[in-house]
Image (tube, grey):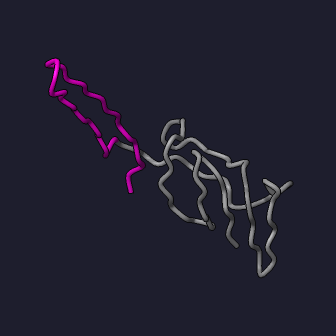
Amino acid sequence: MYAVIKTGGKQYRVAANDKIQIEKLIGNPGDKVEFAEVLMISNDGTVDIGQPFVAGAQPPHLAAIAPFSVIADIYRKRILKRGGRSQSWGWETAYPNG
């Protein structure tokens, strides 16, 4: 049995006991998360496709947030030739450990 869920603007194929990395998930490590946007469920050869979501779906959609750390620091700097100006911007992305 597997399901396709939508979270953080992306789609993920998940099954029981899968570990996936998801961005933009708010919570503390150990918190339970329920994914309500289920797009498709495959269960022993039968496939249920939602329009856009499967109504009354019972997929493996309960999860726990793993301890996470910031592993991607993205900073850029641009120096403009004329005018003696510079511009910098950046952000940090958090992913779960493991």
| Total tally of numbered discs in the picture | 0
Please, is residue 91 above or below residue 35 in the view? above
Name the quadrant containing residue 72. top left
Where's residue 51, x and y in %?
Answer: 82, 56
Classify the position of the N terminus by image quarter.
bottom right
Q: Identify which residue is drawn at 19% across, 27% down.
A: 80
Q: Identify which residue is drawn at 25% across, 27% down.
A: 88
Q: Would you say 45 lies left or right of 75 here?
A: right
Please, is residue 79 above or below residue 70 in the view? above
Where's residue 65, x and y in %?
Answer: 52, 46
Extreme residue toward the bottom, this view: 45
Q: Would you say 13 lies left or right of 24 here?
A: right
Classify the position of the C terminus by image quarter.
bottom left
Q: Identify which residue is drawn at 47% across, 48% down.
A: 66
Q: Identify which residue is drawn at 66% across, 56% down.
A: 5
Extreme residue toward the right, this view: 56
Q: Nearer the viewer, residue 38 or 19?
A: 38
Q: Nearer the viewer, residue 91 or 97?
A: 91
Q: Is residue 68 magenta?
A: no
Q: Is residue 81 magenta?
A: yes
Where's residue 33, x and y in %?
Answer: 62, 45
Give the residues in magenta: 70-98
Q: What is the magenta segment's predominant secondary structure?
A: strand
Q: Would you say 93 lies left or right of 8 here?
A: left
Where's residue 39, x and y in %?
Answer: 73, 58
Name the quadrant containing residue 49. bottom right
Please, is residue 76 above or below residue 35 in the view? above
Please, is residue 83 above or below residue 51 in the view? above
